[in-house]
Each structure stands twice: as structure tokens, then as C-alpha cells.
Amino acid sequence: MSDTNFFQKVYAAVKRIPKGKVATYGQIACAVGAPRSARQVGFALHVNPEPFIIPCHRVVNRFGRLAPAFAFGGEEIQAELLRSEGV
């Protein structure tokens, strides 16, 4: 699977996360048919080309923790976005 194809699958899966819910990197990896690719999911979201269209703030790590290196403003911005959605 090419990186471009993988990234597109990741973005499509993340778009399906409902407002007010979260998913883990591993869950997204499984959803796109690459269960051992949680880190690659993280990289795909780090370079998210449409941060307000692809809600990458709804993806957390396997312990439910936020991303300290959230690409669009850091952990506090991710927390704020999630709180605004009732998470």
C-alpha cells in the first residue's frame, strides 16, 4: 500500500469519528486494514492537509491521553477542541 493511499484511508477513517467521540491510533490502523501501523497513523495525522476538515484532534493514544506534539497547537489546543465537543 502506498503512503498516499494509506494516508487517504486514514483521513477517511478519522472523518467518520463522530463529534463528541474519540478513537485511538491503533483503532484507526485496524480500521484501514493495517493493525500494526499506529505510528504511521500518527504521522499521517501530523501532516494532516485539512485540519478543520479531518478532525485529527479526535484521535488519542491507547491510554486515552492526548498527543503532546499535537500538530495544530499542542496538547492544550487538542484538549480545548475535545472539550468544546463535550469530550
Image: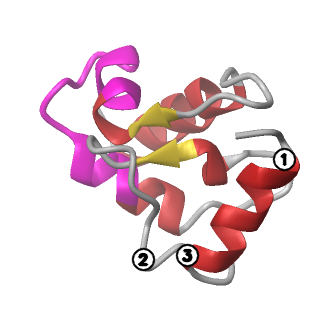
Name the kind of residue labelled 2 in the image. Answer: Pro
**Nearer the camera: disc 1 or disc 2:** 2
Quick one: SS at disc 1? loop
| Callout 3–callout 2 Cβ contact below 8 Å | yes
Specify the quadrant of the image occupied by residue 37: top left
Indicate whether residue 83 is drawn in magenta: no
Which residue is at a point 44% across and 79% down the rendered structure image? 69
Gap between marks 3 and 2 measured at Cα? 5 Å
Which of 77 and 36 lies nearest the eye of the viewer? 77
Residue 83 placement (x, y as % from top left): 77, 53
Which badge, 1 or 2, comes first in the chain's sequence? Answer: 1
Toward the left, the furthest residue is 36
Quick one: SS at disc 3? helix
Which residue is at a point 25% across and 43% down the rendered structure image? 38
**Nearer the camera: disc 3 or disc 1:** 3
Which of 3 and 33 lies nearest the eye of the viewer? 33
- The circle on residue 53 is 1
Structure colour scheme: secondary structure
Residue 14 placement (x, y as % from top left): 61, 33
Q: Is residue 39 above or below residue 64?
A: below
Q: Which residues are magenta?
A: 27-42
Q: Where does label 3 land, which residue?
A: 75
Name the kind of residue labelled 3 in the image. Answer: Glu
Which residue is at a point 23% across and 25% down the rendered structure image? 34
Could you tell whether 2 is left or right of 53 in the image? left
Could you tell whether 48 is left or right of 51 in the image? left
Q: Where does label 2 land, which residue?
A: 68
Specify the quadrant of the image occupied by residue 58: top right
Which residue is at a point 28% across and 51% down the rendered structure image? 40
Gap between marks 1 and 2 measured at Cα? 21 Å
